[in-house]
Image (spheres, helix red, strand yellow):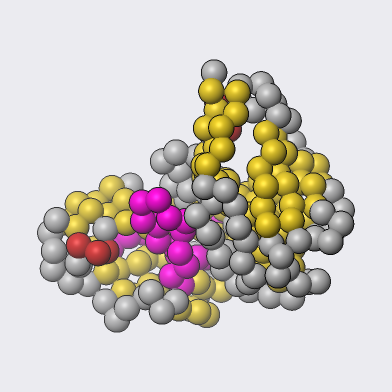
Amino acid sequence: DAKTTQPNSMESNEEEPVHLPCNHSTISGTDYIHWYRQLPSQGPEYVIHGLTSNVNNRMASLAIAEDRKSSTLILHRATLRDAAVYYCILRDIESSGNTPLVFGKGTRLSVIA
Amino acid sequence: DTGVSQNPRHKITKRGQNVTFRCDPISEHNRLYWYRQTLGQGPEFLTYFQNEAQLEKSRLLSDRFSAERPKGSFSTLEIQRTEQGDSAMYLCASSLAVSNNEQFFGPGTRLTVL
């Protein structure tokens, strides 16, 4: 799986939008962009994934650059419960059903009340 | 609660002792993964199963580590002759074997080796 680069930490005020960036300049055409997050003292949980088009679900939105070399996870209104480490992970579509996730260090998001 | 359970949640042991952890995945999931996570790092892959077959093992999985999934349901991870460097959170995840499958993680077992 190709490498991703994320800021070590970010801070947000409660009820404000949060934009978490991820750079993946060596992404291949068959790599999907996945996001997981890990709340304190819990295992990681899936957030969202996409290939080329922007994606929305109940948890977040994923904005993918036109050249696919970067993406942004958007939390529309941060709450204290969104404080977590957010991981951006690339998964090759041809092998994603067969391979484990490759985690980096992620971005630690702090939310201030 | 993701539906994946792990026991015990915490384990403290002395160096040189053997420990065994158990993971119960979501019942219809045929894929089961083990990861290890140390402080400040993301989880690192150890091994995974499809049904009862162990398909891949990481180089992190030394000879002291062994994992089984005897009936394709629950799995155990055993560490023999524990070392202080084995202290970590051991995470289990399960999924269906389809493209872009979402992995569901358990709460982990925190191992402390004294």
Specify whether B40 is left or right of B86.
Answer: right
In the rendered image, which quarter is residue B26 located in? bottom right
Name the residue at 78% across, 55% down: A50
Q: Quadrant of the C terminus of chain B?
A: bottom left
Q: Is residue B29 at all visible to an observer of this figure? A: no
Q: Is residue B89 above or below residue A39?
A: below
Q: Is residue A19 at all visible to an observer of this figure? A: yes
Q: Any magenta on residue A94?
A: no
Between B106 and B62, the one lying in front of the other is: B62
Between A96 and A74, the one lying in front of the other is: A74
Magenta-colored span: B20-47
Q: Any magenta on residue B23?
A: yes
Q: Position of residue B34 (x, y in %)?
A: 45, 64
Q: Position of residue B65 (x, y in %)?
A: 31, 74
Specify whether A83 is left or right of B38.
Answer: right
The mark tally for this picture is 0
Q: Is residue B55 above or below residue B107?
A: below
Name the residue at 80% across, 52% down: A64
Q: Position of residue A44 (x, y in %)?
A: 53, 49
Q: Position of residue B56 (x, y in %)?
A: 50, 79
Name the residue at 84% across, 61% down: A67
Name the residue at 54% across, 60% down: A103
Between A95 and A61, the one lying in front of the other is: A61
Between A88 and B61, the one lying in front of the other is: A88
Q: Is residue A27 above or below residue B91?
A: below
